[in-house]
Amino acid sequence: MYMKRYTISALILIALVGWYVYAFITHESMSINVFGVDLPSLSIAVWIIIPLVVLYFASIAHMTFYSILSGFKLRKYEKDYEKIIDSIVDAYLSKKERNHSFKTERYQLLGTLMDSATLFPNSEPVTTNVKVSAVLAVIQSIKQGEVVDLKPYNLKFDNALVIQNSRNRYKNGDLNAEEILSHSSEYTKELSQEIYADFVTTSPLYAIEQYKEFLTKESLYKVLERINAPENTLEISNETISKLLGTLEIDTQEYIKISLALSHGMIPEQRIKLFEMLSTENDDATEAYLFTLFDLEMLSVANELLAISQDDEYLKFKAYSALKECNKIFSINLFI
């Protein structure tokens, strides 16, 4: 557009200069010798406009050259703008591996910051960019518990959006617990453990044992709650319980909590035998065994164990035993 205006203006100026010289200054013609060559005789007005024509073409060449350079520079900015959009999309998607290369200085700083940042939209911003709008819509849908197709974004299985989307699929019935647990390599361990904690509330014992690698303390207590429960009753041997406990790191206090949890459903005889067995396998379970004996009023057996212990061992239980001998009534729970 500007080149066309310049050309029209330049031609008008050249024509006016030539007309003015020819009409008001001279009608004469002359020949010019250039490097020993006599050029044809032309009107002086023509010789006047020739440099103007040369200047016009030179300026056109100059403007064309810099227009091409400006076009290349503008193209770099346009490409970097698209990369910035991609980096914003990746930041919203919480991608871990990001490395966008920018050609222009203005976008390099912003691009570097975006590649090391994660964006969390509080609401769905209004934007005219199709890519950003699509990603924000996907994020909003996942937050609302919907299931979306994340394949176009090439996200890894441990991405937060992928995890939540899988959780939504499970809650919506598109996936069942066993499908997730049997293909655990496609999901994070945390999600598998979360699903397993729900899985053990109704599943048979063989299935619980099959996926016990995902057992957590939360899911363990859910298993223990089912022993002799009114619904979803679970019959489980002491050996099986011991194997389940062996998959977790359980300290002394946790063993006592387990005994307390079992007091609501497990019959006393099995409970005593369980902690007797556990105490022989692990010294950390000895206090839980003593707690179980005192809780079930098996005072003689508990006192026999205390009698063969060191003077500085199990002091709380020894204190409780002494109070019992003095006919003082206290709950054993106050001593744990």
Image (cartoon, rainbow, N blue to C red):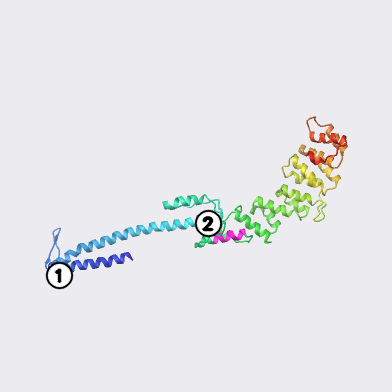
**The magenta stretch spans which residues?**
134-143
Question: Which residue is tagged 1?
Answer: 23
Q: How far apart are marks 1 and 2 (CA)?
A: 69 Å
Q: Nearer the viewer, residue 274 or 37?
A: 274
Q: Residue at point 54% right, 62% down?
A: 134
Question: Which corner quadrant of the image does residue 231 belong to?
Answer: bottom right
Task: Determine whether label 1 and label 2 are within 8 Å by CB.
Answer: no
Q: Which of 183 and 119 is in front in this view?
A: 119
In this rendering, the answer to whether 16 lies above or below 65 is below
Question: Which corner quadrant of the image does residue 249 belong to?
Answer: top right
Judged left or right of residue 301, residue 19 is: left
Badge 2 crowding class, 10 Å Cα cut-off, few under 14, some 14 to 19, many 20 or more, is many
Q: Residue at point 15% right, 68% down?
A: 22
Callout 1 amino acid: Ala
Q: Residue at point 61% right, 58% down?
A: 143
Q: Residue 108: image x %, image y %?
A: 45, 51
Question: Which residue is tagged 2?
Answer: 89
Residue 139 appears in the picture as rendered: yes
Q: Residue furthest front?
A: 328
| Magenta residue check for 137 | yes
In this rendering, which labeled residue sits more in front, label 1 or label 2? 1
Q: Which secondary structure, mark 1?
A: helix
Judged left or right of residue 287, residue 66 is: left
Q: Which secondary structure, mark 2?
A: helix
Q: Residue 243: image x %, image y %?
A: 76, 45
Question: Which corner quadrant of the image does residue 37 belong to?
Answer: bottom left
